[in-house]
Amino acid sequence: MQASSMGEFAAFVGIDWADRKHDICLLPAGSNKRELSVLAHRPEAIAQWAEGLRQRFGGRPIAVCLELAKGPLVYAMQLYAFLVLLPVNPTTLAKYRQTFHVSGAKDDPSDAQLALELLLTHPERFTALRPQSAPMRMLQQLVEQRRMLVDDVRRLTNRITNALKQYFAQPLEWFKDKDTLVFCDFLTAWPTLKQAQRARKAHLSAFFHQHNVRYPHIVEARIKAIKAASALTEDVAVIEANRLLVVVLVEQLRVLLHAVERFEQQIADLAPTLPDYSLFSSLPGAGPTFAPRLLAAFGEQRERYCCADEVQKYAGVAPVTERSGNKSWVHWRYCCPKFLRQTFIEWVGQTIPRSFWARAFYQSARGMRHQAALRALAFKWIRILHRCWVERTPYDEARYLLALQKR
């Protein structure tokens, strides 16, 4: 935002948000008197406050500085077009406070005043929040929430693995993938080795057939392994306590697996309806998982990133250089959207076996650690993706290899 555009606003507001209430500092344009107030975090209170501003200032634009780019307060304020939301990084505001309050003193009303002061002093550092279309915002939330559920699945499978190792470790060898319904159903039916060994051969064979394990030699090998297995312990206290834990955790895991499927179906229905989906679905290794995540990462507002360098920095892929005197060191970015960086890093790992130049680049980085090599590869991929995204041109591996040869 340019300093010259500050005259368009009828008032300026700094907000220090919290869970139950928000401290507000309001300054009308052309006035030196700051008005402090407290806004309860209730839809009715927020609506009444916004309507009061509309009537007081005649619906003219009001600049609002707050430490949020998304969340309940942002969603509530976006209902009012005259409120221009200008998010600021919480770290920026914290450092600004430390500049003038070296004692470390902190209070919510003073933070609201500092947010207002920062807006008035450095308006060129702020960019107005412009929400993308509802389908795009929905996709962004769906892919991130799906990944959180996948993380929950991994945590549960780790807990189940640990519990099984205490008394019944054999299923960990019999089933390679723990995040599957066949694994859950087996432990629900036979949570202990004794119960599994008491089951009839025909019953076990029918179970594997129902779960699409139809190769006779695999079924026979598993049944033999079950019958020949030896118990790790006969201690009833250990077996019963961990058996109950496994049964409870498996029930939770089954619910999570169905939830992930529902999210994936919703994403699969929504993503292809967005205009730029074809740009990302054709990428090597994208598939039904990473194509929607990459689409959500770039969004649909092409003026948001004027060059690939901005994407690389915002995603946390570009390294940071620090210099002081004769010292200079390079490290990765600590402050960035973690899910966004995770999206790029995980996807480029899938491109290594599917892209000739990506595999060659990764193999040439043998001196780097695996994660550092992936970040270096993501740095190059983002330049390509940004160009394709801006020009609305699908990625062409042969075309890119020819460009590399010319260079």
Image (tube, grey):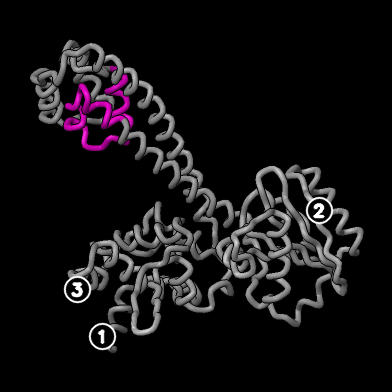
Magenta stretch containing residue 213, yes or no?
no
Q: Amino acid at mark 3?
A: Ser
Gap between marks 1 and 3 measured at Cα: 17 Å
Q: Position of residue 371 (x, y in %)?
A: 29, 62
Find residue 313 and report its horizontal and vertical position in percent: 45, 71
> What residue lies at 45% left-to-right and 66% top-to-bottom?
315
On screen, residue 72 versus residue 136, left or right, reads right
Residue named by callout 3: 364
Q: Residue at x 37, y 67 (%)?
A: 332
Q: Residues within 10 Å of mark 2 (few under 14, many from 20)?
A: few
Kindly indicate whether the residue at mark 1 contacts the one at mark 2 (C-beta within 8 angstroms): no
Q: Give the labeled residue for mark 2.
A: 37
Q: Secondary structure at mark 3?
A: helix
Q: Which residues are the magenta region?
A: 160-189
Q: CA distance from mark 2 to mark 3?
A: 60 Å
Residue 405: image tag: 1
Residue 233 percent coordinates (x, y) = 15, 17
Q: Quadrant of residue 192?
A: top left
